[in-house]
Image (tube, rainbow, N blue to C red):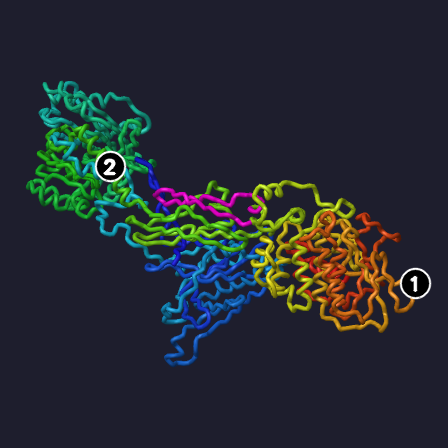
Amino acid sequence: MTSLPSLPRRLSSRSFLGTAQPTPPSATTFDPTALFRQAERVVATQSCRVRTGYMPFVRAEALLVCSKTETGDEAAIFVMTPPTSSESASLLYIIPVVAGFKHRLEQTPPSPSTSFFAQSAKPHITLYVSYAATNLELRISATQSAKVQKLVAELRRLNDAACSSPSPRSLTHSWIQLYPVQTPQDDIDEVDDLGSPETTTPSNISASDSTVTLTADTPTTAITLVSATSGLDEEECPDPYLPSFSRTDFMRKRLFTRQEKWSTKTDIRIRVATYNVNDKIPPKGTLELAPLVGDGEEDLLVFGFQEADLRGQALLISQGNDRAESWETALLNGLGPRADEFEKLVRTQYVGVMMIIFVRKSLKERISRVQTSERGIGLLGFGGVAVRLRVHDTTLCFVNAHMAAFATALERRRNDYLTLKTGLSFPRPSEEDLVVAFEEFWPENKDRLLGQEDAHALFWMGDLNYRVDLPDNHVRKLVEDKKWDELLEKDQLKTDIASEKSFAGFFEHPISFPPSFKYVHGSKTLDTRRAPAYTDRILWSLPPITTSPPPTISCQQYTSHEILWSDHRPVSAVYTLEARVVDEGNQSIELAGIRKELDKLEEIYRPSLEIEGTSLDFGDVRYRQSVARSIKLRNTGRVPAVYSFKSPSADKPICKPFIWPFPASAVVEPGQDLDLRVIVNVDEIWSAKLTLGEDVNDVLVLQIAGGKDTFITVQATYLPSVVSLPLHVLSTLPSPIRQLPLSERKVLARPLAPSGTNGEAPIRPVRDIWRLLECLMSTGIGVEGLWTEDVEVGDVIECIDTGKDLPAGREKQVASSLLHLLAAMPAPLLPTSHHADCLKAEDRDAAFAVLEGVPQIHTNVLIGLMSVVKLCASGKVEDSKPEEGKTVEKSLPSADDVSGTVTEPGPVIAEHDDAKPGDTQVSDPVDTVVETEDQPKKSIDEQLSKKLDEISFGDDKTTGGSPAVGSLGEAIELRKKDSQGEIAFSSPRRKSSTTPSVHSSASEAITRPKSDSKTTTGQPVEQNYDLVDKLCPAVFGRVTVDHTRHQRRRFIRLLLEG
């Protein structure tokens, strides 16, 4: 079964780092437009069950497809089976919407019976469609009634347009031959019920929609894909073509999970301290901060201050760095003699919230990526500052915060935490000097900033202002008794951490010191106006990291200090952290190995198709005879392979219009084989181009999403055909078209001088057209439905192209082939410039007057066609014997007499005023033969044979190659008289009163019968609209013009009655 196309599941991306993979369309959608050429569009769709005759129902999807052609839109119904997890989809039927197409809609309501058998059949809608021998029954769920009505409305509109199209059936719907059909077999399992599945009608389906996309709501989309990673560990071997896959993240994760190969660990000691100084400035030269700054054993000193500047002006404008520098000096003085081992790394401040970091000078060169951030809260100088830095290859982040006060402001403190957590962010570093795979916290989204949690360790310090949820007297009692654990049981911060209402995931070393708030300035006495609380805290957390395990952190000290400058006591903590030290050489080697692993992984998951038969030779290709070749596609990879065909440019199709690969896009599952069919079908438009030398060969580019492109060569030899060649080209053919070499056919394609009109030099006859007319004149008389039935024309056209004898006993094929050739020509027999005049003609004289300005070659063929049609249509006339002893004069003009002339069909018998009753005088006789009714029948056959020889183009009995139209008319009249038992024959009367010479001018070419003329051509042709409509495309062309149909019919009837 042939697999139908599906939207690509993944797209190829060869980008290396920092480029996001494009998101492919979902594999659960099906786009029917991928099945068809650009000229076709899907007008409507309908899920159904289908059957023909008494075969079992098959679940299917009906598509109403419209194709835009040069002569108008053509429609067809495509019935296909939807793809399933075990079988591919296929085209079951294609029914053209043409004259003769029928459709009928029935609705089966629920059965009122309560029996089991009556209830087993669900209510449903049945759409019957038929054409020729194909009769389909489409059974649809009753819930789809609205959608069905829209489908039928579009179907009715297109059917009406098809019925009004003048094109012969043999010249329409050649495009459907490009799509292979596989009818269902008798062994298909019968479905358990005859109702369609309950589905939701997509809202985007309407009668006026030009295209409809099937979504997951329709059965066609129920495609189950084989797991792409069957047998593989998705964690260890992820699919690099999935939209969620990131090359950077893959390499970074692999690199850092193997960090033991390119890194070592070293301990870093960090002192963190927080102090609410209550707007105090340290005295000059003070050493009282020594307990807070430690003894200089740590490598990194981080100090957070709150209320460092409470001046009102500081809320509006910076007041300088004097206070900050005073605190820096006091901190260094506290280090004593070891102050020279440290230097300031960074200082940042927001109003009264300030952070100062000192680093040991020996470690300074190992610190990089120092970034700061500030954020305010409210209008009183509350807020926070943050510093992010890297020590060796370990990233640390420090946050100093001053949050809302008072015991009742718990919810505000929670909001302050969230504000500072999201608001204190850092810019992305420049990418110029970075290897992104080495950056563990690098965000691939370029609009995303770095956050506090983009670090290995995060420290929060400050006056967080969390209180104790106990009455003030109870708190003071517990403080007096030094029952710190009982106090901390009601500590708001610890409660929030446990409930994850704020500071979720943070840790705090056990507290073994008294509350840090609130004291009387300059003393150790608690202030009775406020309840004591642990407002000053130091916390840390290890943000979750997916690339590597978190570092090890231990707290050696967590205490407060008896520094009496403020109503708060400072708090400090000392931590030991394992920092990662990188060996850059080994790191680069490991990254190179990971890149190779990624390349191998891409090869494993790269869609791969083995393609057999990339050079297609179609051999000899004939007009409108489809030739197909197959290409075997086999998926040898581990993932579904999505293929399609690449167009040469955005405005060009993937191949020439007469070539089409089916399916043009599809998904081939792992281990699955697909038969890709390439079909060549040359229509009338391309037949002339290829005949006159245009190249038939082509190259198709099959592209695999995420894989390689494959070139498929298409080679063929188009056998030349006369179809669609102009009359002036056909008239120059010295032999059948198939016998002419390519060089001579290319000469025919060159622009020629306009064809001669009446009065110009004679041109050669259209051999192939007159050959068909001769055949019909000989064997087509009296054949019922000769011109109105649609039959195959391929055999007759092949005989015309090759010069072989026309098939015997196939008069209808000959007639259809004649109309096919004339309608397929690039210009109609009656040029468009004359259409306005012909529509005004209301009698025979006016109709024939229109032909005076028509090119001679067109006039010859038109008159010949009308003569033969009239002969064949009026062949069954009543016998009328002439009076006994009556003589009839018969004129037998030579080919020279009619060379280059155009006359009206049939002989014209003129009655002169002085003629005696019963006598007939023939104008311009050349030879006169007097015969009686007693003459043997054999003489009639001899005369007919002689006339047919005169208009035959296999000998030299024509002058200058001009058709002996007068002789053709005489032969037609002879045949008619033979069928009537008469032997009268006459050449037509010319317009000149004098006897014309052998080289009479073309100005005398058209002889129109007067309204009172009497002819012996039998009864007039009946007003058969079917016959007239069949002639319209040859005379006027195939463009539908409904408002002039009546006038066109009238004009053709006038020509037939002439």
Q: Quadrant of residue 965?
A: bottom right
From where the camera sits, is residue 102 visible? yes
The secondary element bearing badge 1 is classed as loop
Give the camera-side residue of 164 and 195. Answer: 164
Q: Position of residue 859 (x, y in %)?
A: 73, 52
Q: Residues within 10 Å of mark 1 (few under 14, many from 20)?
A: few
Magenta extent: 690-719
Badge 2 amino acid? Lys
Give the camera-side residue of 290 and 1012. Answer: 1012
Identify the residue shown where x is 88% and y is 53%. 993
Give the camera-side residue of 124 and 621. Answer: 621
Identify the residue shown where x is 84% and y is 60%. 928
Q: Residues within 10 Å of mark 2 (few under 14, many from 20)?
A: few
Q: Where does the C terminus fall, quadrant-wise? A: bottom right
Q: Position of residue 853 (x, y in %)?
A: 76, 49
| Gap in angstroms between the C-alphas marked 1 and 2 | 110 Å
- The residue labelled by disc 1 is 913
Q: Quadrant of residue 398?
A: top left
Identify the residue shown where x is 45% and y is 65%. 144
From where the camera sits, is residue 380 visible? no
Q: Position of residue 402 (x, y in %)?
A: 23, 35
Q: Quadrant of residue 937?
A: bottom right
- The residue labelled by disc 2 is 596
Along the horizontal axis of the image, is 343 left or right of 681? left
Badge 1 amino acid? Asp
Q: Where does the N terminus fall, quadrant-wise? A: bottom left
Identify the residue shown where x is 87% and y is 65%. 920
Give the camera-side residue of 11 and 507. Answer: 11
Q: Is residue 695 magenta?
A: yes
The secondary element bearing badge 2 is classed as helix
